[in-house]
Image (cartoon, rainbow, N blue to C red):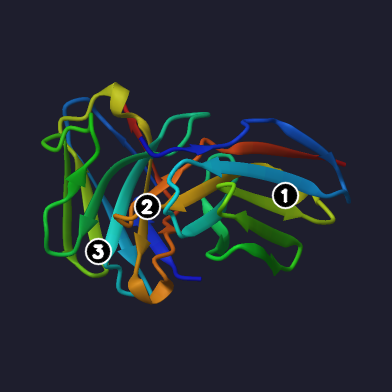
Amino acid sequence: QKEVEQNSGPLSVPEGAIASLNCTYSDRVSQSFFWYRQYSGKSPELIMSIYSNGDKEDGRFTAQLNKASQYVSLLIRDSQPSDSATYLCAVRLRDDKIIFGKGTRLHILP
Amino acid sequence: GAVVSQHPSRVICKSGTSVKIECRSLDFQATTMFWYRQFPKQSLMLMATSNEGSKATYEQGVEKDKFLINHASLTLSTLTVTSAHPEDSSFYICSASAQGLEYEQYFGPGTRLTVT
């Protein structure tokens, strides 16, 4: 059973601080990893995709991948109240199916 | 990013009737479309995967005769909930992916189904 694990939270972070979201996955051969943001009552929105070890930065967001540790993370710098949402980690399997973690609820404190 | 639309955004139907939900990729050709269901405060549950022109692959526990999926073209997939019951009330979300987009999945805005 392929799995993606995330801490459900809620993770509370002061406005302006760095929010750090973590994810581990079980399928060692996975090559593609994604972070989605989902606001309550809305569908998920793709924020970042990462395919190789290391960091990938896009604006205030940085995705980090460590395939040896089977670990993916998302850093959000200068956190804003509008960043409050549930963040879903997703991993593509060999059969191209994408499996999702249960999500981490992030709450930015004004 | 790529745009996926869903119609309707919200539907209320009576128990025993059928409801069709459409999912369209607006600016790309989707080789694969996925249908998810999400109950309040729960995670996304993959229901089925469909490729254009072939039968959908359903996840374990999802009744294929109740949730009919048709993927007639590279831009359109439909989900029909047949003989709907109140327990089918949920948020149904489709997503689409394509090789040219490195298989990233883009989600539609979702359809909230309420069965009375």
| Mark 3 residue type | Leu
In space, the residues marked 1 and 3 are separated at their CA atoms by 32 Å
Disc 1 + disc 3, Cβ < 8 Å: no
- For residue B116, say whether it is visible: no
Q: Which residue is mark 1?
A: A83
Q: Chain of mark 2?
A: A
Name the residue nearer the viewer: B115 or A48.
A48
Name the residue nearer the viewer: B105 or B112.
B105
Q: What is the secondary structure assignment of the residue under circle 3? A: strand
Residue A20 appears at what percent x and percent y?
A: 74, 46
Q: Chain of mark 1?
A: A
Tell me, yes or no, whether dots 2 and 1 are on the same chain.
yes
Residue A108 appears at what percent x and percent y?
A: 79, 41
Q: Is residue B109 left or right of residue B113?
A: right
Q: Is residue B20 left or right of residue A76?
A: left
B53 relative to B110, above or below: below
Q: Residue at x 81, y 51 (%)?
A: A79
Q: Residue at x 56, y 63 (%)?
A: A50
- For residue A103, say whether it is visible: yes
Q: Residue at x 43, y 39 (%)?
A: B44
Residue A1 appears at what percent x and percent y?
A: 35, 35
Q: Which residue is mark 3?
A: B76
Q: Which mark is residue A93?
A: 2
**Foreground disc of the pair 2, 1:** 2
In space, the residues marked 2 and 3 are separated at their CA atoms by 24 Å
